[in-house]
Image (cartoon, rainbow, N blue to C red):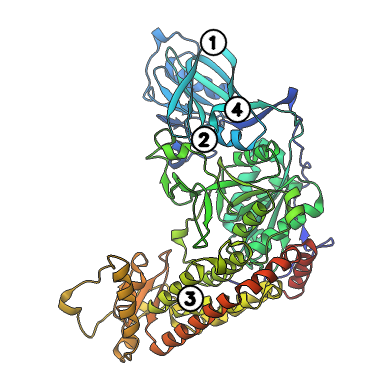
Amino acid sequence: MTEQPTETKAPAKTEARTPAKPKAKSPAKPPAVDDGLRVLHRVVMPAERDLDVLRLYVDGNAVFGRRAADLDSAAEQVLAEQDGDAVRAASSFKPSSKEDSAEIIGRRSIVVPSGVRVSFCTYFNAFPAGYWRRWSTVDEVRLRLRVRGEATILIYRSTGKGHLERIKSLHVDSDTPVEETVDLPLAPFIDGGWYWFDIIADGRTAVLESAEWCAVTERTTPGTATLGITTFNRPKFCVEQLTALAAAGDVLDAVDEILVVDQGTDRVEDHPDFPAAAAALGDRLRIIDQANLGGSGGFARVMHETVESGRSTYALLLDDDVILEPEGILRSVTFADLARGPMIVGGHMLDLYNRSILHVFGETVARYRWWMVPAPHTHMGHDLAAHPLRHTPWLHRRADVEYNAWWMCLIPVEVINKIGLSLPFFIKWDDIEYGLRAKAAGIPTVSLPGAAVWHVPWHSKDVMTDWQSYFTERNRIITALLYSPYERGGNMLKESLFITIKHALAMQYSTAELMLMAIEDALKGPDDLHPSIITKMGELRELRSRFVDAQAKPDLDEFPAVRRRKPPRKGRDVVPPRNRRAMIQTALLGAARQVKPVGSFPKTHPEALVPHVDQTWWLLTKFNSALVSSADGTKVAWYQRDPQRFWSLIRRASALHARLGKDWEDLSRRYKAALPVLTSQDEWRETFDKARQQR
């Protein structure tokens, strides 16, 4: 991680600029809503021909069709292959090899052959009525469909308990497109539930040309967003995201500007595909070169620029290592437009590497532990392909959250003006703190179904053992000082001490040292936060360079062969502790082993090879040294037991946690008093200026 990227001069008052590219048409404002009817949620098909995501859009047997640019020609081509004539009667229908499959022929269109049924009871296409019922001013929704051919359309709803009900059916038999509308109440959805529809081509082939969930509203001018991407040395990811946005069509009508806050040394603008993406986006795209201030510094810059420009209603924050479903932009903006009051609207996280997995549906903070947890009655890592919406009752219950991570999060400018920008946390807990700060100000956060990104999952990152552990510990403590309702943070200090001890028992000495540094810095008080956001990464790199457990190599053959001087006693494998008592006993025995010196043999040969999935503290404490692989499987580190360092860490950890408990009330008052200044435009502007001078 490098916090000092190469400076690029700006032509204006800041280092931000629009990259050189052909002049393009200025961003268009969204049109006014006709007759007060606002489209809330459009039914869409996958933006790419990706079979792994198909079940998130269509439930049933569906395939990707021709994707001709013109809908009519695409539909007629499919119809002609299926029955020889787009208007031939069902009696003369001649089956094709795909007679049992609906064919997607456009972003919003699908052809359903005779005898086939498809459902839109899916993550991206069912209408999340429970969320609109709870948080919006809308009390009735209108389903508007444009269909041709012969079809029966069945409309369903679910309850918050996951019970399904069929409420209406329509029949269409027309060679030309027919528009059908159905008005549906939101009153029954106080606990949750969805609306959706199925299509059955029960006579001859049917074509769904479009479908929309709409509402009559007094707000006739849609809001717009400044979309901000913070990136660090991920130019390929970032350029692919820009390319996808350029192809998003009318979704960009809701976007005033796309800001890329580039904080790395591997520049986005140097990627070979950047010029084409920049030309396609035209004046909407602006690159901001900035020293590495982490995610919170990058997103604070997006908030700052959005407020300063005065163009947008919202700032929409996006991570750089995501793939966005572009329709989520419109859905988030529309939901925020029609909310009962100012509201943060977040998107869900899907697994980038296993794309049918809904990784996170909603999150809250466990107050007594002071740790992030799934929202009540939700589950992590749910496979929507294996267990779709129709068959998953807990997905029908509305999930209320306290924050939304900044992989995708829309924040009204009104909220930024009221509660400020991000805290200067660099990374970790910045999004959680912001959600809790907003909640304290009476501003709710909603994680909106149907708005989502595919993001790199946590199990592919070493976030709890690498340099990020410093920011996790420090920022968790500061957030607890600001918002914990319990004396001295409840159980947080005890849990923090236990975690530090476990890292020391596992020979993860660099991680334990980072956690102690985090406590020391939290004890310094709020005045250290803005200055340290510029310099801290350099300090962390220097600290980690002194520890062998932080020196990873890409090849096992770069280490000595794995050997043990003595075999395991009676050939027994290490088994996990069965209960709390056994766990405490294992920890005490592990600590007792630290009295014994380490012989020379474990320093010349690792005793074990431990895959990342097995790197638990209770296993590692059994060895004097071990090779341990990283979460992403690309490198290995050699952990080596050091009794002197172990006892030094334990003594300091005990003293620092005791001091933090003793100073808790005073520190809490100081951080709360400093919060308005720390998050102000003026304070951040000064930090941006200092960072630019030190590049």
The reply to whether the C-beta atoms of the residues labelled 3 and 2 are less than 8 Å apart is: no
Q: 188 or 665: which is nearer to us? A: 665
Q: CA distance from mark 4 to mark 3?
A: 50 Å
Amino acid type of the residue that numbered disc 4 sits on in the rendered structure: Trp
Q: What label does residue 174 carry, if any?
A: 1
Q: For mark 1, give the secondary structure.
A: strand
Residue at image mark 4: 213
Q: 354 or 676: which is nearer to us? A: 676
Q: 691 or 434: which is nearer to us? A: 434
Residue at image mark 2: 192
The reply to whether the C-beta atoms of the residues labelled 4 and 3 are less than 8 Å apart is: no
Residue 438 x, y percent position in the rendering: 67, 53
Crowdedness near tag 2: few (<14), some (14–19) or many (≥20) residues, C-alpha within 10 Å: many
Q: In the image as oriented, which residue stretches furthest toward the left?
A: 570
Q: CA distance from mark 3 to mark 2?
A: 42 Å
Q: CA distance from mark 2 to mark 1?
A: 36 Å
Residue 56 x, y percent position in the rendering: 47, 38
